[in-house]
């Protein structure tokens, strides 16, 4: 009994209390925000289980209990059983596809009597554990072989495909945040640059289609110019071939001036043929240089240009034939192509009105008009932040964002002090999930991102999201507490040894 009490007191001593305090503050602020968002004039009790706030308090109590139980489990269990936990969650995601009821077009919720759970939320901590386990394997290095990349990508994309099969796009996209972890562990920055370029090319191609330049949409012309600029930049920075980069730049500039002069003179130039010829000639010149200067980076640069052109040609096909009509409409509204204030743009428009009406100091707790009169749909779940903006204003919103920032910075600090690869990788997984959710949810609420159903951690109503992030965070705290105690013991032993030797 005494030993158990000693272990418990040691665990409390090793616990990162600033993180716990921030977590509790965020969760309690979330309950208050849910109460404000769903306030019922006829039933004003925050603690009534008939209200969303009362139900959320029940989830909060169970989350606190789950966090305590996680802290009592030996930290080595999470590493030893990382793959079995991942396997169980994958099986649960597969089962969900077939037995989950259709709720708003999605089959992602398991109904268990009076409550519903979303396995995709629990897949986050399981995937983080599996990825951390992979990186902590003996002599594992991400860049050592292509098979190591394949293993990491398999762990990340398997739950993504299963969740997409449930028609839950938002939850599936959240797993892409783990690419930041791969970057931290050695993945080339070219991958993140390629991802950013993909988004920019997609948005530019879709948004600017009205005006024609050289017979093709101005968006496609802009993408071709960006491909040319990227080609020159990669030659100069990535390949370190300044002379070749200068020659390609002169070629692009000269052909561009020639095309402009011909257009001024009334000579019609087929834009598509022009750009393909100009870029194709540049790629041919680059490959010819590769014969003289054998260098892998040259082939990567040429391949990137070819893939960029292929992606450009696929954008309209993907947008029109792969995306669902409601997804197309949301993207069009987010990009300002269409307004649709009574349809796909209604939620975001009402949310922006609510946040804007809050001003600097807000209208006061329970005094929001947009939220109280239910103008904002889903205001207690995905659009919970608009309640904060309306009632607490800019200052209240800033305080919430600062709390999230403090939590993320604290987690990154925990990650960097981990003595094991498993602890470090897992911590960065937690930070990546949080950054993605916060950025996309708030971007969604203020109209910067399409509405894809991403909850705000610890604030949005629902037990699955709260439990999922609680599991993520407290597993990290348990690992960190054990490592902190181990380091403290080693330090004391070293000091005792020095005293003894003296």
Image: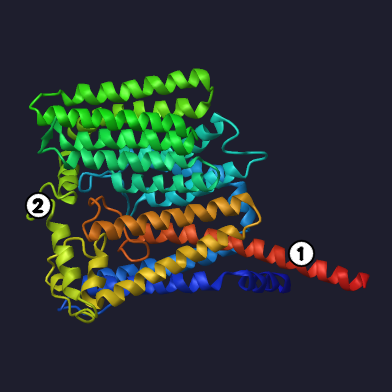
Look at the image and tell me in which quarter the N terminus lies: bottom right
Q: Quadrant of residue 406?
A: bottom left
Q: Quadrant of residue 105?
A: top left
Q: Is residue 411 left or right of residue 329?
A: right
Q: Nearer the viewer, mark 2 or mark 1?
A: 2
Q: Nearer the viewer, residue 24 or 194?
A: 194
2 or 1: tag closer to the N-terminus: 2
Q: CA distance from mark 2 to mark 1?
A: 63 Å
Q: Which residue is pictured at 19% across the width and 51% down the height?
A: 334
Q: Secondary structure under badge 2?
A: loop
**Image quadrant where one finds the C terminus:** bottom right
Count of picture labels: 2
Quadrant of residue 308 in the image?
A: top left
Find residue 253 and report its horizontal and vertical position in percent: 29, 33
Vertical relation: 203 (above or below) 500: above
Location of mark 1 (residue): 490
Residue 365: image x %, image y %?
Answer: 23, 81
Under tag 1, what secondary structure? helix
Residue 100 percent across, percent down from the top left: 30, 44
- Few, some or many residues within 10 Å of mark 1 (<14, 14–19, 20+): few
Which of the pair 352/224 is nearer the observer?
A: 224
Q: Residues within 10 Å of mark 2 (few under 14, many from 20)?
A: some
Residue at image coords 15%, 23%: 270
Q: Is 337 placed above or below 376 here?
A: above
Residue holding disc 2: 339
Q: Can residue 49 be seen from the camera position used here? A: no
The location of residue 10, given as percent across then percent down, is 67, 71
């Amino acid at each position: 009994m005494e030993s158990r009490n000693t272990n418990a007191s040691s665990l409390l001593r090793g616990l990162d209390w600033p993180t716990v305090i921030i977590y509790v503050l965020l969760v309690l602020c979330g309950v208050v925000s849910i109460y404000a968002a769903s306030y019922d004039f006829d039933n004003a009790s925050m603690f009534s289980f008939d209200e969303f706030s009362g139900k959320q308090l029940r989830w909060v109590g169970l989350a606190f209990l789950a966090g305590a139980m996680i802290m009592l489990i030996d930290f080595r269990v999470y590493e030893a059983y990382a793959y079995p936990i991942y396997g169980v969650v994958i099986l649960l995601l597969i089962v969900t596809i077939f037995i989950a009821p259709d709720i708003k077009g999605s089959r992602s919720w398991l109904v268990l009597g009076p409550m519903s759970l979303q396995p995709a939320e629990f897949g986050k901590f399981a995937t983080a554990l599996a990825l951390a386990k992979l990186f902590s394997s003996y002599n594992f290095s991400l860049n050592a072989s292509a098979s190591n990349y394949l293993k990491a990508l398999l762990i990340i994309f398997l739950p993504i495909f299963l969740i997409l099969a449930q028609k839950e796009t938002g939850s599936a996209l959240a797993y892409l945040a783990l690419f930041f972890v791969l970057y931290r562990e050695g993945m080339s920055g070219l991958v993140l640059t390629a991802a950013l370029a993909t988004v920019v090319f997609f948005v530019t191609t879709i948004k600017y289609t009205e005006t024609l330049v050289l017979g093709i949409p101005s968006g496609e012309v802009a993408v071709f110019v960006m491909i040319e600029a990227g080609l020159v930049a990669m030659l100069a920075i990535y390949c370190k071939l300044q002379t070749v980069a200068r020659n390609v730049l002169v070629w692009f500039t000269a052909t561009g001036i020639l095309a402009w002069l011909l257009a001024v003179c009334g000579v019609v130039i087929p834009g598509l043929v022009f750009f393909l010829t100009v870029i194709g000639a540049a790629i041919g010149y680059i490959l010819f240089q590769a014969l003289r200067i054998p260098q892998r980076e040259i082939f990567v640069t040429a391949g990137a240009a070819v893939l960029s052109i292929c992606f450009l040609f696929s954008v309209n096909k993907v947008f029109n034939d792969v995306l669902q009509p409601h997804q197309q409409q949301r993207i069009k509204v987010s990009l300002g192509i269409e307004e649709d204030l009574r349809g796909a743009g209604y939620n975001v428009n009402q949310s922006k009105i609510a946040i804007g009406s809050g001003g600097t100091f807000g209208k006061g707790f329970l005094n929001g008009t947009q939220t109280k009169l239910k103008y904002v749909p889903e205001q207690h779940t995905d659009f919970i932040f608009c309640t904060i903006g309306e009632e607490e204003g800019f200052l209240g919103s800033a305080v919430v964002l600062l709390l999230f920032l403090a939590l993320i910075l604290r987690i990154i600090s925990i990650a960097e002090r981990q003595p094991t690869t498993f602890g470090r990788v897992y911590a960065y997984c937690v930070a990546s999930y949080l950054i993605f959710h916060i950025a996309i949810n708030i971007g969604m609420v203020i109209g910067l991102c399409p509405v894809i159903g991403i909850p705000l951690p610890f604030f949005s109503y629902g037990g699955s999201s709260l439990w999922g992030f609680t599991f993520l965070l407290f597993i990290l705290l348990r690992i960190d507490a054990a490592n902190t105690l181990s380091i403290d013991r080693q330090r004391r032993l070293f000091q005792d040894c020095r005293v003894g030797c003296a």
